Amino acid sequence: MNRRKFLNKCNVVGISLLTPFGSLARGSEKEPAKDSPNFILITADDLNYDSVGCYGCKIPGITPHLDRMASQGMTFTNAHVNIAVCQPSRQSIMTGRYPHCNGAEGFEPIDPDVPTLQESLHNAGYLNGILGKEIHLRPKNKYCWDFYITQGQLASGAGIGRSPELYYSYSKSFFELAKDQNKPFFLMANFHDPHRPFAGSDQEKRAWGHDLPKATRKIKSSEVPIPDFLPDLPGIRKEVADYYTSVYRCDQSVGAVIRALEESGLQENTIVMFISDNGMSVPFSKANCYLNSTKTPWLVTWPGRVTPGSVDSKHFISGIDYMPTVLDIAGIKAVGKMNGFSFLPLLSGKDQQGRQYVFTEFHKTFAGRCFPMRCVQNERFGYIFNFWAGKTKPMRMDSTSGLTFKAMQEAGKSNPQIAARVALFEHRVPEEFYDFKNDPGALHNLISAPQYQTDIEQMRRVLKDQMARTKDLALPAFVNRDNPTALDDFMNDQQTRARRKKQ
């Protein structure tokens, strides 16, 4: 898609100032307290957790602004999103519910009766703003945006959602609006980096022609660490370098939003959190349930409340915990049926029970293929069940569209070890069990290892109990996982539901 088609698709219009959103229809706004805190949620698109300097990336100066955030606030080392693909990940974050509980398992809107964070904040008198990725929060009327910057608007001037200058300008406009209206605010700043097409890649040139987003630093192939879940091949090394060029530009956008906040004078009463919506767009990361699929950098700054340079390496938090945490901090009554719970105590350095596991899932349909998965992880192990293993055509996703997967396929013709990795990615096995603490790349499936059978059975029980608590429709198939007919029936039902949602 060239830039002209992209702009037409996004229906570019001027800045949307929808203030107050739906005030005549809702009639439930109240005057917020004068000291109500402000909130900023900054999201990267397809950023692997270990691509950030403060999370161990070895490329010098790759993320200076995120590293500064870490030095000024709290770093969570066991943070995850609940599904590793853009729209359902974001809608899970904004509803406090797993995708199978809010109706948005893939690229569909949430169910109309599911409350959103924006509705609660709007009713409490907050000003809601969004920069980019608005198409991944649907339906629009459920999100109550007062300040609405579309992907198309962020494309102007060859930005394509990747221009730090545009993010600075729009952020500054939003903060001025909040000051003019004397309202507390919530801003969701969504960057398109480091999503494909990566900066400087042939894929980017095919997408945008010669009207390309600017990149002020080019990362060289010789500089990059190759993820341990990928082989070190020339094509992969080239693509990973392009990815890191996009990572650097993403960090510049982070700095642009923070600079606009500091210049506004509103920083002291503003809580800023940074996350990624899922892992990088390569095999065994995005659109799966591995550690590198859902683990995210999660940084929090809150002047005077969060200790600078603090690190939480004990507790698991996830996307479903974001909405209840914001409501808790804002003093707004919690919404019923949320699956997550507030981690506000952790921001003060306190302990909190019930945070030793994280649960993730996947559903997405691609070209008529469903790939349902469920996963539970703790501080050491990860257990994954693949309902689709051997029951559909080979996996194809955004992550297979570039140089990396093609390089693996080509190398697999002469390298049996790489060929086995390609086969595993494309077809999977029903059960996978990994020692993520010692094998974060998930290279060694321990499901048949005798010494881990007690741990495996425990993780199966934990996952089963969680599926029962959340009324997961996949539960009967999981309970009867040794029955091929039960799995076939579940997969057929998944295909039917996917077709029905598409209509």
Image (cartoon, rainbow, N blue to C red):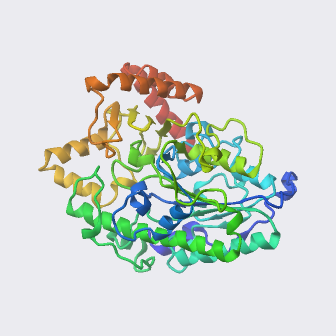
Number of disc labels = 0
Residue nearer the viewer, 77 or 245: 77
**Residue occupying image coordinates x 25% and y 46%:** 422
Q: Is residue 328 visible?
A: yes
Give the answer, above or below, for where 413 lies relative to 164: above
In percent of width and height, residue 476 lies at: 49, 22
Q: Quadrant of the C terminus?
A: top right
In percent of width and height, residue 83 lies at: 49, 44
**Residue occupying image coordinates x 34% and y 33%:** 433
Give the answer, above or below, for where 161 lies relative to 302: below
Residue nearer the viewer, 233 or 40: 40
Residue farthest to the left, as pictured: 414
Position of 369 with respect to 409 (left or right) is right
Q: Quadrant of the N terminus?
A: bottom left
In percent of width and height, residue 51 lies at: 39, 60
Residue nearer the viewer, 431 or 134: 431
**Residue occupying image coordinates x 44% and y 64%:** 194
Position of 367 with respect to 277 (left or right) is left
Give the answer, above or below, for where 330 lies relative to 449: below
